[in-house]
Image (cartoon, rainbow, N blue to C red):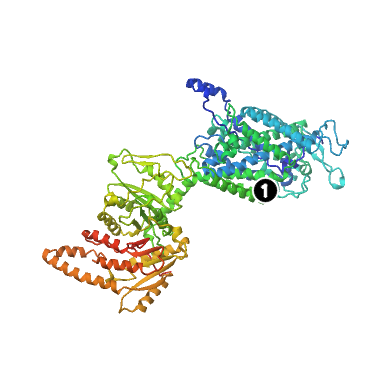
């Protein structure tokens, strides 16, 4: 029995042997620059080796990878343990799992041009560089370890037949056993075999294809001899290995030929102890062993860089190989069950050698298939490494692997792979990592299914593969099947492999450069967002679930950084839109000037780390532009309900964006010229410089005070809440949150003290925004202070108690501070009495009673107040605290109905908020608070 090869190395091995070829086409050298294009094309074509067709490029590599040694050594083991019924069931389940992945491979490979890289290219271009890079590294390592394992397996098989026994016994030795044995001798033999593989791979894929074709012929001849032997070999008794003592069990078994008794004895399962490992077999362990021989389906698709027509060859070649191997396994299982004794199958895994018409046929087949699988793994590892290097996922670390020969063969990647395989050979025995190699390959298969599933679910119009025999159901079944097999083979290794993949994914996510491949996550997000936006019904809005959805109008981001970051704190997971109006007329412009500005605005959003959208518009006036944005911003139920405007004053703006491109930006009225910044780490903010100081006056602004108040009035008419912000040009949240932090709230209409109230819609909206700010993580330590303005003669304790009860019902925590303001109110009434007399006299003289009725039909919620009163109220606010608050919230009355009073209205607001620090004037029009559960 010296010619028999033990199963120990092969049964536990991961015989999923993938191959890949990744070629970079060189398009021109220095010496070709002065030649004609036709001559260059002819010279380039002459350098490139011929491409492979469907048979040599896909069918043969896939067949050899799927057969490997399982067809010679494992099929009898499976039938002997499981019986014919369970063997066929296992084959059906195994091929069902891999067929789901094959359908995904065919779909992706027929969806446009497939570049070199095979499975890695499919996964990375569909799922992005993070997922593709992590799977690519695992695919590379699996090929390296698989190559080393197969080389050692081949060495052990050779030494079993031709090695001198280590104990020096001459009883079991034959005249063919001439090779010395031992650890270093085995390492030397493995190095020689590996050098042979490296030599083939260094020459190129065309030599590899020819070598695999020769091996394919040898394997097919060996396989043909096995089928013939079942029919022409008569009854034969075979001596069993390892059972020389009859007391330990039978020492021989029978090859019976075709007999019904043999078939009936092999149809049912009979699990026993594996004589080569001493482990009790079960359905799960045998299934894991058998499934290893059904993988290898990526061998053809990974040769995509060397195929004439990958989209045509990969589906047809892969399916042909899968069907052919399935038929062979089924036929072998049936023939073995009909002709072999059960003891022979369970106690001699190399029985095909003994029953063959010529014993060396099976041994040659084992050697040939193992050598082919080793070459397949080595060339696959080199191509995957070259693909990773070419995509720059790991920067300079893999840059040497980009180099190729004149014919496009990545020889540096081959050498790196060879060195790593040589290092793995030092371990001598690789049984401990055999399972994890198989799990790595199964992860690749699951990733391909996931890529196809993502493309199908994204419903992208450009995903229309010519191979249509797949659905998302087949992708899900493939993923589930691969996951089950991973944990069935070894749950610990499967968990460790997934954790390793996630670690690589995070590493690539934070270290790799941005790719231009397109990310499937964006398509999936778009698909889901569109679906949920359609489900977001504005008719079902309820006050319990109200949240601020803010449109912040920004004139120039350079002087609005503090404001932008502050508004981000009060949005409470709501919609946040940065709006900007550029004056212009598209009719007289050659193109839309806004398209080139979006990159700068989005870079600003990333730089400030805020969650906001950007919406720019072109209009003939700022007012019309704001109207456009209020009408069209958002989508479905996600539309702005609050407009935030900077305050209209003459304060000179200051640049808060300190980036390297500021000093190199040159702007003109007709064009914008931006030089490339020297520091590439700084974000490119190509915004115009801030306007000059006070010397520009109001003439340097894009809108006047009348138009500014009109914008506020328009927003109120459109039922939008309005907030005017002042003194945020120098707001720094980091400094504002140092030490004791206070947020002051004045929920009373200070412009109309005669009708002061704390429970109207605007006051409650003011309280809600202040409470939302206090709920933000950065502002949680801030204390809310609610100022209650009172006059003599009113019940102070009663008013304060009502306000405390209201805050308790609204679940708000705030300190109530009472503020007497009799002196200020007295100033108001003095001016009010004089103003009313003057107005009555003017109305009687001019006869404008009708106009007055029209104006009163639109209550302004404001009154004519004197400057003295406003200055007194302003001073009252300033005098209330020793330490100024971080932010103040004040009541904003709606603009007057009489447009001629817009200037006075703006003047009143300016006096009220003068020198108050960061202040928000807020007017609410919608109910936002409820006490219901």
Is residue 375 in sight in this rendering? yes
In screen coordinates, is 61 left or right of 654?
Answer: right
Counting every numbered tag in the picture gives: 1
Q: Residue 748 in the image: state x and y as whole percent.
A: 33, 69
In screen coordinates, is 760 left or right of 742?
Answer: left
In screen coordinates, is 667 left or right of 65?
Answer: left
Instruction: Assign a secondary structure to mark 1.
Output: helix
Crowdedness near tag 1: few (<14), some (14–19) or many (≥20) residues, C-alpha within 10 Å:
many
Rendered position, 416 above or below 475: above
- In the rendered view of the protein, which quadrant contains the C terminus? bottom left
Is residue 88 in sight in this rendering? no
Q: Between residues 620 and 819, which one lies in front from this camera angle?
A: 819
* Residue topped by disc 1: 489
The image quarter in which residue 900 lies: bottom left
- In the rendered view of the protein, which quadrant contains the N terminus? top right
Q: Which residue is drawn at 83% across and 31% down?
A: 178
Q: Residue 389 in the image: state x and y as whole percent.
A: 57, 37
Q: Which residue is drawn at 40% across and 74% down?
A: 804
The image quarter in which residue 844 lies: bottom left
Q: Residue 589 in the image: state x and y as whole percent.
A: 30, 39
Q: Between residues 373 and 771, which one lies in front from this camera angle?
A: 771
Q: Between residues 671 and 308, which one lies in front from this camera angle?
A: 671
Q: Between residues 905 and 206, which one lies in front from this camera angle?
A: 905
Q: Residue 764 in the image: state x and y as whole percent.
A: 36, 67
């Amino acid at each position: 029995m010296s010619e028999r090869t033990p199963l120990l190395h092969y049964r536990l091995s991961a015989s999923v042997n993938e191959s890949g070829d990744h070629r970079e086409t060189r398009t021109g050298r220095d010496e070709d620059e002065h030649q004609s294009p036709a001559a260059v094309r002819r010279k380039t074509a002459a350098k490139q080796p011929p491409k492979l067709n469907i048979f040599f490029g896909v069918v043969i590599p896939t067949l050899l990878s799927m057969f490997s040694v399982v067809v010679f050594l494992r099929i009898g083991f499976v039938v002997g343990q499981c019986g014919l019924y369970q063997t066929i069931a296992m084959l059906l389940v195994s091929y069902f799992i891999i067929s789901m992945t094959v359908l995904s491979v065919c779909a992706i490979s027929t969806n446009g041009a497939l570049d070199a890289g095979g499975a890695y290219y499919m996964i990375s271009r569909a799922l992005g560089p993070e997922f593709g890079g992590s799977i690519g590294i695992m695919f590379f390592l699996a090929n390296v370890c698989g190559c080393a394992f197969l080389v050692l397996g081949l060495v052990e098989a050779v030494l079993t037949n031709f090695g001198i026994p280590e104990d020096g016994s001459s009883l079991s030795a034959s005249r063919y056993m001439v090779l010395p044995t031992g650890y270093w001798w085995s390492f030397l033999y493995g190095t020689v075999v590996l050098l042979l593989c490296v030599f083939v791979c260094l020459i190129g894929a065309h030599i590899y294809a020819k070598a695999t074709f020769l091996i394919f012929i040898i394997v097919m001849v060996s396989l043909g001899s096995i089928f013939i032997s079942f029919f022409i070999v008569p009854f034969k008794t075979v001596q069993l290995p390892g059972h020389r003592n009859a007391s330990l069990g039978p020492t021989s078994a029978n090859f019976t030929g075709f007999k019904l008794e043999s078939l009936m004895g092999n149809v049912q399962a009979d699990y026993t102890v594996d004589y080569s490992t001493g482990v009790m077999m079960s359905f799960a362990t045998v299934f894991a062993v058998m499934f290893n021989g059904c993988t290898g389906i990526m061998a053809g698709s990974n040769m995509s860089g060397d195929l004439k027509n990958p989209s045509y060859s990969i589906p047809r070649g892969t399916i042909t190989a899968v069907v052919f191997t399935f038929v062979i396994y089924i036929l072998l299982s049936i023939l073995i069950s009909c002709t072999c004794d059960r003891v022979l199958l369970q106690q001699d895994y190399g029985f095909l050698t003994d029953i063959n018409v010529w014993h060396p046929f099976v041994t040659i087949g084992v050697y040939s298939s193992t050598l082919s699988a080793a070459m397949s793994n080595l060339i696959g590892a080199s191509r995957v490494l070259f693909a990773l290097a070419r995509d720059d996922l790991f920067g300079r670390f893999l840059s040497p692997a980009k180099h190729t020969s004149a014919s496009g063969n990545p020889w540096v990647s081959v050498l790196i792979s060879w060195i790593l395989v040589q290092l793995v050979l030092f371990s001598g025995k690789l049984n401990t990592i055999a399972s994890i190699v198989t799990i790595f390959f199964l992860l690749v298969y699951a990733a391909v299914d996931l890529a196809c599933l993502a493309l199908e679910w994204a419903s992208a119009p450009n995903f229309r593969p010519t191979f249509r025999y797949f659905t998302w159901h087949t992708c899900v079944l493939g993923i589930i099947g691969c996951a089950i097999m991973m944990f069935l083979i070894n749950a610990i290794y499967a968990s460790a492999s997934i954790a390793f993949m996630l670690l690589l994914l995070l590493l690539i996510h934070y270290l790799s450069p941005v790719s231009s491949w397109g990310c499937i996550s964006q398509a999936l997000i778009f698909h889901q967002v569109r679906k949920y936006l359609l489900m977001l019904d504005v008719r079902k809005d309820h006050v319990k679930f109200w949240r601020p959805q803010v449109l912040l109008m920004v004139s120039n981001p350079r002087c609005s950084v503090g404001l932008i970051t502050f508004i981000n704190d009060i949005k409470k997971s709501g919609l946040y839109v940065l709006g900007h109006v550029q004056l212009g007329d598209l009719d007289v412009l050659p193109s839309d000037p806004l398209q080139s500005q979006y990159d700068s605005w989005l870079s600003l959003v990333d730089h400030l780390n805020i969650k906001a959208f950007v919406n720019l518009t072109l209009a003939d006036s700022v007012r019309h532009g704001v109207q456009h944005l209020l009408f069209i911003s958002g989508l479905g139920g996600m539309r702005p309900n609050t407009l935030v405007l900077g305050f209209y004053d003459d304060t000179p703006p200051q640049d808060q964006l300190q980036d390297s491109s500021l000093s190199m930006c040159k702007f003109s009225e007709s064009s914008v010229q931006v030089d490339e910044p020297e520091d590439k780490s700084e974000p490119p903010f190509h915004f115009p410089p801030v306007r000059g100081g006070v010397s520009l006056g109001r003439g340097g602004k894009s809108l006047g005070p009348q138009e500014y108040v009109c914008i506020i009035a328009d927003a109120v008419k459109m039922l939008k809440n309005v907030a005017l912000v002042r003194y945020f040009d120098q707001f720094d949240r980091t400094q504002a949150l140092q030490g004791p932090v206070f947020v002051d709230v004045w929920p009373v209409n200070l412009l109309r003290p005669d009708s002061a109230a704390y429970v109207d819609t605007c006051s409650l909206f003011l309280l809600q925004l202040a409470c939302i700010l206090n709920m933000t993580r950065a502002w949680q330590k801030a204390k809310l202070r609610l100022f209650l303005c009172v006059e003599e003669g009113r019940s102070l304790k009663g008013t304060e108690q009502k306000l405390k009860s209201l805050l308790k019902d609204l679940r708000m925590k705030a300190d109530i501070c009472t503020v007497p303001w009799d002196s200020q109110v007295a100033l108001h009434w003095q001016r009010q009495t004089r103003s009313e007399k003057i107005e009555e006299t003017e109305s009687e003289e001019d006869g404008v009673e009708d106009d007055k009725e029209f104006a009163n039909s639109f209550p302004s919620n404001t009154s004519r107040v004197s400057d003295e009163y406003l200055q007194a109220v302003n001073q009252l606010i300033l005098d209330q605290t020793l330490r100024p608050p971080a932010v103040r919230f004040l009541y904003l009355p709606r603009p007057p109905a009489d447009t001629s009073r817009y200037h006075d209205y703006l003047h009143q607001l300016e006096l009220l908020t003068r020198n108050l620090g960061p202040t928000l004037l807020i007017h609410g029009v919608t109910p936002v608070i409820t006490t219901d559960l």
